[in-house]
Every structure is written in C-alpha cells, then in structure tokens.
Image: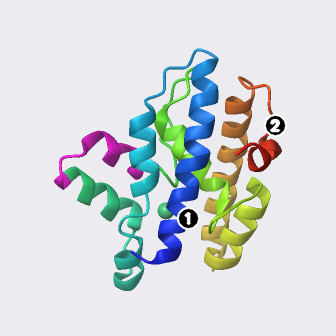
Amino acid sequence: MWDHIIQHSLKVAQVALFLAKALNRTGERLDLDLIEASSLLHDITKKQSIENNEDHVITGAALLKDLGYDRVSKIVKYHVRLPRRRPLHRITEAEIVNYADKRVLHDRIVALKERFADVKLRYAKNKHTLDRINATEEESIKLEHKIFSKLSIDPGDIGNLL
Ligand SMILES: [Fe+2]
C-alpha cells in the first residue's frame, strides 16, 4: 500500500469514528470496531487495482471476504456507491464509512463539493462517467442531510472538532 493511501485511510477512520460516536450519543447503535476496521481497510487493494486496471471496490471486497472478514467486506464493497435499498431512518456503518471517505481528500478534511471536484478532474473522462459521478455526489449530499439531521453540528465543523 502506498503511504498516501495509508494517510488517507487513517484520516477517514478518524472522521468516521467521530461521526459514529456522535450519532451513538443520539441513540444510534453503530458498531465502532466495524467502522474503524472498514475505514482503515477500504482502499486495501487500491495500489494493485490501479496497476492492474481493476476496480478496487470489487477486488478489495473480494480479498476481505476471502480472508473471512465478511462484515468488513460488505462495507468496503459499498464505500464508493451505496446500495439502493437502505434503511430510511437508521444510519448504517456502510453509510458512515462511505460518507467519511467523501469528506477526506488525500489526508485533508474537505467539503463534499471539493472532494467531488477532484474526483471529476481525475476520473470524468467522458459524459457517462461524469453522469455517474454527479449521481454519486447527489447521493452523498442526501446522505449528509440524513447524518447531520441527527446531530447538532454542521458538516463544516468536523475539521475543527477533530
Ligand atoms: Fe476507495
């Protein structure tokens, strides 16, 4: 694993745990260990996937499943795009890891807008890909509302509170 991916993963774990603990104080019952492990491992195959032109979501989830980490595997599988069917009111561990990843650009906490601007710059090579990224951005904005509707802080506060 490249060092910058390690730094990124550490920061994602920090953000994810911060949000999960705050949500648990409001009555959610998020599994903090599961969130920490999944955040740290979410890009586990990123290096090999880039080198082999593979999808790191698929290879990462497959590797973790093979190793016997089924619950972590399922979260890694959804760290870029969430499944369509999700609980309306309860927050899931997958949602927390997915959202935290969207708030960390390299090892820096940023707004969703900045993170997606970078994704578009790097990956939107054609209209199809751009449409897909825009759809994911919409999904993340909705998820942000869902998470922060339960909290008394704003999305922009995370950086100062960590
Ligand atoms: Fe990733």
Res. 22 in view: yes
Q: Which residue is mark 2?
A: 154
Q: Residue at x 71, y 48 (%)?
A: 138
Residue at the spot 81% in from the left edge and 37% down from the top edge: 154
Tell me if mark 1 has few (under 14), some (14-19) or many (20+) residues whose alpha carbon lies within 10 angstroms of its own. Answer: many
Residue 83: image location, x then y, percent: 47, 41
In the image, residue 19 sits, relative to residue 59, either above or below, namely: above
Three-letter amino acid code of the residue under disc 2: Asp
Tally of numbered discs: 2
Left or right: 117 with respect to 46?
A: right
77 drawn magenta: yes
Q: Earlier in the sequence, mark 2 or mark 1?
A: 1
Q: How many angstroms separate mark 2 from mark 1 (CA)?
A: 22 Å
Residue bearing mark 1 = 8
Give the residue drawn at x 40%, y 37%. 33
The magenta stretch spans which residues? 66-78
In the image, is 3 to the left or to the right of 143? left
| Residue 130 position by quadrant | bottom right
Whether residue 89 is visible, yes or no, is no
Return the x and y of residue 64 as percentages of the image width and height: 26, 54
| Crowd class of label 2 (few under 14; some 14 to 19; many from 20; radius 10 Å) | few
Residue 13 drawn at (x, y percent): 52, 50
**Element type at marker 1?**
helix
Q: Which structural element holds mark 2?
A: loop
Q: Position of residue 21 (x, y in %)?
A: 58, 30
